[in-house]
Image (tube, coloured by chain):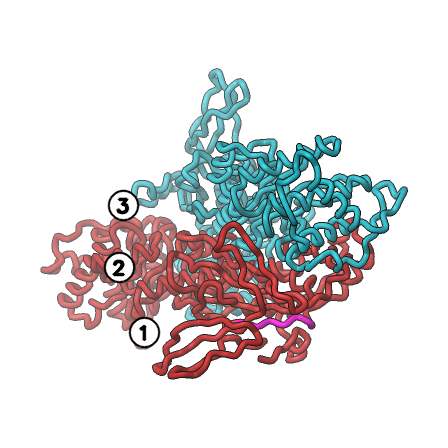
Chain colours: A cyan, B red
Amino acid sequence: MAAANGDACRSVGGVPRPTNPMVTPLLTDLYQFTMAYAYWKAGKHLDRAVFDLYFRKNPFGGEFTIFGGLEECIRFIANFKFTEEEIKFLRSVMPACEDDFFEYLRSIDCSDVEVYAIPEGYAVFPKVPLMRIEGPVAVVQLLETPFLSLVNYASLVTTNAARHRLVAGKSKNLLEFGLRRAQGPDGGISASRYCYMGGFDATSNVAAGRLFGIPIRGTHSHAFVSSFMGLDEITDKTLTSSDGSNTCEDFISLVQNWLIRIQDSSSLHGTFGETSQSELAAFTSYALAFPNSFLALVDTYDVMRSGVPNFCAVALALNDMGYKAVGIRLDSGDLAYLSVEARKFFHAVEKEFVVVGFGKTSITASNDLNEETIDALNKQGHEVDAFGIGTYLVTCYAQAALGCVFKLVEINKQPRIKLSEDVMKVSIPCKKKCYRLYGKEGYPLVDIMTGEDEPGPKMVGFMIYHSFIDW
Amino acid sequence: MAAANGDACRSVGGVPRPTNPMVTPLLTDLYQFTMAYAYWKAGKHLDRAVFDLYFRKNPFGGEFTIFGGLEECIRFIANFKFTEEEIKFLRSVMPACEDDFFEYLRSIDCSDVEVYAIPEGYAVFPKVPLMRIEGPVAVVQLLETPFLSLVNYASLVTTNAARHRLVAGKSKNLLEFGLRRAQGPDGGISASRYCYMGGFDATSNVAAGRLFGIPIRGTHSHAFVSSFMGLDEITDKTLTSSDGSNTCEDFISLVQNWLIRIQDSSSLHGTFGETSQSELAAFTSYALAFPNSFLALVDTYDVMRSGVPNFCAVALALNDMGYKAVGIRLDSGDLAYLSVEARKFFHAVEKEFVVVGFGKTSITASNDLNEETIDALNKQGHEVDAFGIGTYLVTCYAQAALGCVFKLVEINKQPRIKLSEDVMKVSIPCKKKCYRLYGKEGYPLVDIMTGEDEPGPKMVGFMIYHSFIDW
C-alpha cells in the first residue's frame, strides 16, 4: 500500500479542478479554521492524524451503498490552495488570530496528505472506511466538510439509482428527469452524473450530458401540445422521405387520412371519436421537425381517446415516408392500465395495417415514479419499456441524507476514539486495513478490518482482495 | 403594471451572473431544445406565450410557503446568451436540425421576456403564480427548467427554515450547520443562503458567509478534543489578560486549580470525579487560542462528569483574566435533561464562586435536530439558548422536494389549459392578475386571482395591495 500524494498527482499532468467552481477551500465549516488556529497556537498543527470517512447505516432501509464522489475529492485536494482573497476574508472572520497563522494558511496544500480509498462505484458497507485520510491534523480537518459534502449526496443518489435499476430490471431503459426538482442546480447536475453511475441509461439534463458525456434524452412537454390550436398553424407541410427519394407535399393530409383509416378500421372502430386537433397539430409538427425520432407525450387531453390514436396516425404517416416512430410517453393516470391498453392498440394497428414491428412501439412512463411505484407496476403487469424518473430519484425522497462521518482514529500513532451515549456513534479507533474477501466463484463474501500492523486474513479456501486502492 | 425587460436590466448597471457558474442556458432539459426546434420549424417560435410558475400544495403538511430563488432567476435571464461552445455542443446533440436553427439560438436573449413576480421572501400559497413569464414561446420554454431548479429548492428550504424559527421561538439563536449533509456543494451553499432568509441567525458555511454576507459561527469538533492526549502537549501556557494589564505565565495551572476548587466546593462536591485530561487539554488549548470566544463541545466523553466541569474550570480561569466564556455545545444524548443539568451546574458555580452572570452561560444544542425534536424539547422543558441544525433542515428531510410547475396559460392571447385525470394537475388557464388583500389592521387576509382584463377587487372596508412587482 504505497501512497501518491497531492504533488505527485499534480505532476502527473495536472488533476482538473472540482467540477463545480464553488468547491473551494472555503467551502467548509468555520470550526475547521478555528480548530486549525487552535492547533497552530498549541504547536500541534503538524501532528500526524488519521481520519476515517464512513457511514453507520445503509440508506433506504437497504443492504448496500454505492460509493460516489471520490473523483471530486481527489480533484479538490490536488488543487487545494488558498487565494489571497480567501485569506483576506478569513482574516476578517477571525480578526483576533495572529498574522503568522494566515501566513501558515497561505503556505498549505495537500502535498503531505495521503488518501486511501475504495474505488468509486463499488458497493460499500457500514463502518468500513470508504476513505482513510492521513496528514497534518490541521490540514486534514480542513478537508472534512468538503469531503463529506462531496461524498454524502453522491453516494446516496448513486445508491438510489442502483436500487431503481434493481427493481426495474436490466431490460428497461431508465431515464433521469430530475433537474427541475433537484436541490439546486448543482444538486441536479450531480444527480444526473451519479444516477448514470448507479445504472441509469440517460438524463434529460443537457449541462450534465455535456460535462460528463452522459446520453441525453428529451422530446416535448404538455405545454408544447397545448400551444397548438389546430393543424392550420403548420405552414410548412412538406416532408422528404427517409431515403430522400420522394417528398410528401402535404404531410398533414397524410396524417389526417391515417387517422380516418384507424377510426374506420374493423378492430379499432368505435374505440375513440374525435381526437384533439391541438394535440394532432403538435404531434404532426414535432414529427416534421424530428421524423427520425418521433416520441409523443400522449396524456395532455385523453390517452386512449386522443393521444394514442393521434400518435398512431402520425406514426403511420411517417412510416409511409420510411421513418420509424420511436414511441409514446405517459405522464399521468394508471400507468399499468394505460400502457397495456396502448400496447393493445399498437398490436391492433400492426395487424390491421400490416406494419411489422408496430406492436413493439416503445412506451415510456413518467410521473412521480419511485422504487415502490415501479415495484407495484411490476406486480400489476405493465407494458412500459422505459421509465423517466425525477423527483423521488434525485432528491432521494425516501431518505434525503446519508450520514457519512469523518472521525479521528489515530494521532501521532496513538489510537483515538469518540465515545457517545449512543452506541452507534462510538467510533472504531486505530489506523486500519480493510479487506474484501471473495469466494472461489468470484463473488464477494465479506469485508473485514484489521489494525494496520496486524497480519491480513489467511487464504484458506477463498481469495483475498485488498479493497483499498492507493491514490 | 409596467415591465422592465432583460435589456433594461442590463442597461441599469449590469445584473450580475447567477451565483453558481454552473447555471448556464444549457442547465435545462433537452426537450426544451427539441421543442424550440419544432416551434421554429413550424414558424411558431415567436408566438407570444404566457406561463405561470406555481406550486400545488404547501410543503411539510403546512399552511404556507416562503418564495425564494427570484434573484437568481433574474440574474439568469439578464445574462441569458449561448456561447459558441454551447451552440457547438447542441449541434452535436441534435445533428438532424437545420443550421439556421442554431443561428436562431445564437441570436436569442431574454430582452423580449417579461417577468412579473411576487417579491422574494414573501409568504405564498398554492396555485397563485409566484412568477408570470411572458415572451416568445421558444425562449420562455428554455427558461422552464432553470427557473424551476432555482425556485423549487430555494422556496422549500426557506420555508423549512421559517418553520424551524416558528417552533424555536424568536428568542433562540438558530444556526445552520448543514453543509456536510446537503445535497451537494451547491445544495449546501443555497441552504445557508435561504435558511438565513427564512429566519436563521448564522451559518457554519464559510463560503456562503462570504458570498452572501451571512454571519458565520463555529468552534471545534469532537476530533479536536480527542486529538489531545493531555495537558503536557500545550507548549505555550501564557495568557495576557483581556485589558492587557497582566500576563498569566501558567494558564494551565490556573485551570487545574479551578477544577480542584469546583471539585471541592460544597454544592458540587461529589457530582463528578476525575475528568478527561484529553478534553481538559483541548478546552484549555482552545481557550488560549480564542479567549474572547470560548465555546466548548462538552460531550466527547461524558457531559456532566467531564465536559461541563472541564468547561467551567477553563471558563473560571478565563474569568480571572477578564474574559467571559461564551458557553457549551451539546451534540448527543438527552438534550433537554443535559441542558437542565448543565444550567444547574452553571448556577451552582455562579453562587459558589460569586461570578455574576455565569448561570446564564449559553447552551447550544445540535445532533439531528428538526421541527419535531425542537417541539418535543419545548414540551419537556429545556435550557437551550441556541440550536445548531443540519441534516433535517438543509435536505428538507420531511419533504425533500417542492413541486413547483411551469404551465402554459395563454398563447397569442388564447387561454390554454392542461387537463389531467388528476384534478390537482389541471392548470388554471388565462393570463392573470393577482392581489393580496389586507385588512385595516395591516394583516393579509386572502390572495385572489382575476383575469388580466377583469376589474380588480373593490375596496370595501379593506386595503388592496397588488402583490405582483415588475421586474
Q: Chain of mark 2?
A: B
Q: Identify the magenta region.
A: B111-117
Structural crowding at the residue carrying mark 3, measured as other residues with C-alpha within 10 Å and reported as few (<14), some (14–19) or many (≥20): some
Q: Nearer the viewer, residue B356 or A289?
A: A289
Mark number displayed over residue A469: none
Q: At x 57% / y 74%, what residue is drawn?
A: B452
Q: Label 1 sits on what residue type?
A: Ser
- Residue A202 at what x, y percent from top left? 63, 43
- The answer to whether marks 1 and 2 sit on the same chain is yes
Q: Quadrant of residue A386?
A: top right
Q: Nearer the viewer, residue B157 or B59?
A: B59
Residue B367 visible in rendering: yes
Q: Are marks 2 and 3 in contact (CB under 8 Å)?
A: no
Residue under label 1: B242
Residue under label 3: A421
Q: Nearer the viewer, residue B146 or B469?
A: B469
